[in-house]
Amino acid sequence: ETEAARNVMENDAVTTAQLGYGYAVSGRREEAQAILREMEKRRQSGPFPALSFAHVYVGLGDKDKAFEWLRKAVEQRDVNFNLKTNPLYDSLRQDPRFGELLRAARLE
């Protein structure tokens, strides 16, 4: 369904990230990595939300990269942050960097 939505939404950043996350959590790591490469190419030719990268890295279980991109999303003042309530971030909540991120985003 996400693949079909991505085609309809003309490869928008949110749907692309959802697809990458879905690939990652379903064990399709190579496809998730391909989504990251595609997003990086798109970022080189224009703005691309850091939060999209963070979501794929969360799905891959790469906490270091996820926090790196989440910090960039805070710097970009991304309005799609739901750090406190989004279950997507559950795997990061116990990490001390999560509290730091909440403070940086002025959510704590």
Image (cartoon, rainbow, N blue to C red):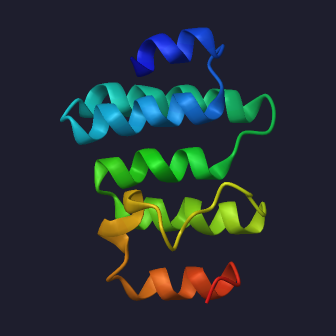
Q: Quadrant of residue 47?
A: top right
- The answer to whether 52 appears left or right of 72 in the picture is left
Q: Position of residue 82 (x, y in %)?
A: 57, 63
Is the residue 93 above or below the residue 29 in the image?
A: below
Q: Is residue 12 above or below residue 68?
A: above
Quadrant holding the N terminus: top left
Query: Which residue ends up furthest to the left in the rendered image?
Result: 27
**Horizontal and vertical percent for residue 30?**
28, 28
Question: Number of marks in the image?
Answer: 0
At 68% across and 78% down in the image, what residue appears?
Answer: 105
Residue 70 at x, y percent in the picture: 57, 64
Q: Choose between 85 and 20: the one closer to the eye.
A: 85
In which quadrant of the rendered view does residue 12 lie?
top right
Residue at x 57% of width, y 44% of height: 52
- Above/below status of 60 relative to 86: above
Q: The C terminus lies in which quarter of the figure? A: bottom right
Query: Looking at the image, which residue sits at the far front?
Result: 85
- Residue positioned 78% across, 60% down in the render: 76
Q: Residue at x 62, y 19 (%)?
A: 11
Q: Left or right: 107 with respect to 38?
A: right
Residue 67's x, y, as percent?
49, 68
Image position of 56 (left or right of 13): left
